[in-house]
Image (spheres, rainbow, N blue to C red):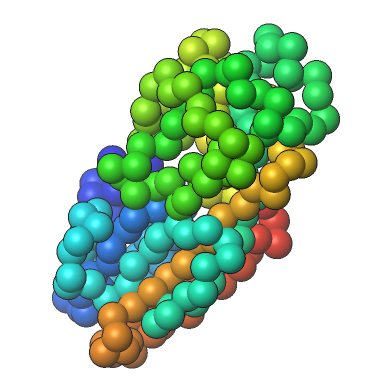
Amino acid sequence: PVLDNLANELRAIDNADGSVVFLKILAVRESVARLLIRYRRENPSVTFRLVRERNASTFDLCFSAVPHEVNITNGKLALREEIMLAVPDTSELAVAESVDLCDVRSERFIAMKREGAEDGGVGRFFELCGYKPEIAYYSDSPYITRDLVAAGVGVSLWPASAWRDVPTDGIRLIRINNPVCCRSICITWPSSGIRNRNVQKFLDYAEAYFRNLSLNPAA
C-alpha cells in the first residue's frame, strides 16, 4: 500500500528546511499519500507530520469520511464519491449492470475496518436495507480487500474514487441502485482556524487535487 511506503517516498525527495504541516488522516489514505508525494515534489521545503489516531487533538488539517448528508463545520467538502459493490469476476453477480443492496443479504462481506476510521458511515446502507451483513473479514487495505474478493472470500463495498488506482484484477465493480450509496470526504481544521499560510497553501492544493478526482473518477 502506498501509505506504508510514504515515509521513504518523502525522504527520497529533497528535505530542505521549512514549515511543518500536521495532518490527521482518518480516511482515503492511498489518495492522501499520492497527494503528499506530489505536493512535496513541487514544494520540497514543506515537511509533513502524520497521525492516524482519531482522538489526536494536535493537527492542522484532518482528512475524514462522513455520510454525504452530514453538515461540515470548520472544514470543506473535498470529494463526494460513489460506493460500489465489488464481486469476484467469476460470481453470478458479475454479469449484472447494477444491484439492489437488499438483494445481496446472503453474501458474506469484506468490511472496511472501523478501527482505521475508514468506514465513513457506510454501515448505515445495510441498516436502510434492514439487515446486518455477515462479515467474512475486516480489512484496512484496498489491496487486501481486492485480493480477498478475487479469491471468493466475500464481496465488498468499494469507494469508487478513493480506490480508483487499485488494480481490479479478478473482481468486477457494480453500481448499487438502491439505496443511494455515497460518502463525502472532507478536510477539516481546528476551531482556532488555519494556522498559517503554508497550511492554507496546502489546503488549496488538496482541494484542487480532490476536485480533479471528482471530475475524473476513472482517470
| Residue drawn at x 45%, y 57% as measured from the top left | 65
Q: Say which of 192 and 38 sits in front.
A: 192
Q: Is residue 41 left or right of residue 192?
A: right
Q: How many marks?
A: 0
Q: Is residue 158 left or right of residue 91?
A: left
Q: Is residue 186 above or below residue 127?
A: below
Q: Horizontal and vertical percent for residue 57?
A: 18, 70
Answer whether residue 81 is visible to the viewer in this image: yes
Q: Say which of 80 and 9 sits in front.
A: 80
Q: Is residue 152 above or below residue 196?
A: above
* Quadrant for the N terminus in the image: top left
Q: Horizontal and vertical percent for residue 191?
A: 29, 85
| Residue drawn at x 33%, y 78% as measured from the top left | 189
Q: Say which of 6 and 189 sits in front.
A: 189
Q: Is residue 103 left or right of residue 213?
A: right
Answer whether residue 149 is visible to the viewer in this image: no
Q: Say which of 153 and 36 sits in front.
A: 153
Q: Is residue 31 above or below residue 166?
A: below
Q: Is residue 120 above or below residue 206?
A: above
| Residue drawn at x 55%, y 32% as measured from the top left | 131
Q: Horizontal and vertical percent for residue 162?
A: 53, 49
Residue farthest to the front?
130
Q: Horizontal and vertical percent for residue 102?
A: 68, 31
